[in-house]
Image (cartoon, helix red, strand yellow):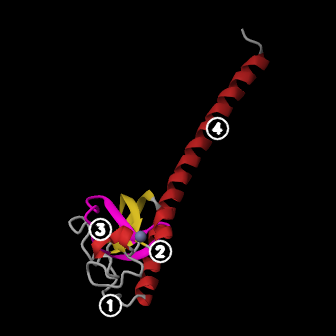
Amino acid sequence: MKPIRELIGTGFLIFCALASLILIVINLIHLSLLHEQTDRIQSQILLTQLEIYKAENPLSDKPIPSAKAESRSMIVTAYCPCQKCCGKWADGMTSTGTNAYSVGVAVDPKVIPLGTRMYIPDYGFCIADDTGSAIKGDKIDVRFNTHSEALQWGRQRKTVSIFRE
Ligand SMILES: [Zn+2]
């Protein structure tokens, strides 16, 4: 027969193991709930920012989309209205006729219809108002006023939000 002290020791060890297992499970549940909450708050913030953007934007007379923003991982390059970026199309206007010296994004209209409102992390809210021969599929091109800003942006993969109306 084992000494009493050893038995108590084993019991205590099993108790500790069970207790930490329960704690881990509780923590995991808590984390997943927190994650869900963060997601919900984040999408709420996005929609609020979109409302503010639309209020400040002259093109913002469309109803606010009730649908949730669609998130999509895309390759985001940058350009400016200069000749180096636009070649013969460097006339200060986008392909939809808006002022090219403004915030906006060039898209593949087959993927994102022109006029779609978007949110691009580190760039902000903008409207898909331009196209480009190299902008196909999951590639988009954000517009800056100066060439150096466009160069500085480079090429980045971002999870963009597309507000389909
Ligand atoms: Zn340029």
Crowding around mark 4 (Cα neighbors within 10 Å: few <14, some 14 to 19, many 20+) is few
Q: Is residue 113 left or right of residue 81?
A: left
Residue 23 image point, x, y percent: 62, 43
Labelled pair 2, 1 in contact (Cβ < 8 Å):
no
Q: Earlier in the sequence, mark 2 or mark 1?
A: 1
Gap in Å between the C-alphas at discs 3 and 2?
19 Å
Say which residue label 1 marks. 61
Say which residue label 3 marks. 107
Mark 2 within 8 Å of ligand 1, using the beta carbon:
yes
**Tag 1, which secondary structure?**
loop
For the record, the magenta segment spans 119-142
Say which residue label 2 marks. 146
Number of the label disc, if any, that sits on residue 19:
4
Query: Which of these two is toward me, 5 or 86?
Result: 86
Q: Amino acid at mark 2?
A: Thr
Q: Is residue 108 left or right of residue 22?
A: left
Labelled pair 1, 4 in contact (Cβ < 8 Å):
no
Mark 1 within 8 Å of ligand 1, using the beta carbon:
no
Q: Amino acid at mark 4?
A: Ala
Q: Earlier in the sequence, mark 3 or mark 4?
A: 4
Crowding around mark 2 (Cα neighbors within 10 Å: few <14, some 14 to 19, many 20+) is few
Between disc 3 and disc 4, the foreground one is 3
Between disc 2 and disc 1, the foreground one is 2
Locate the C terminus by quadrant. Answer: bottom left
Locate the N terminus by quadrant. Answer: top right
Q: Amino acid at mark 1?
A: Asp
**Residue 140 lies in the magenta-colored region:** yes
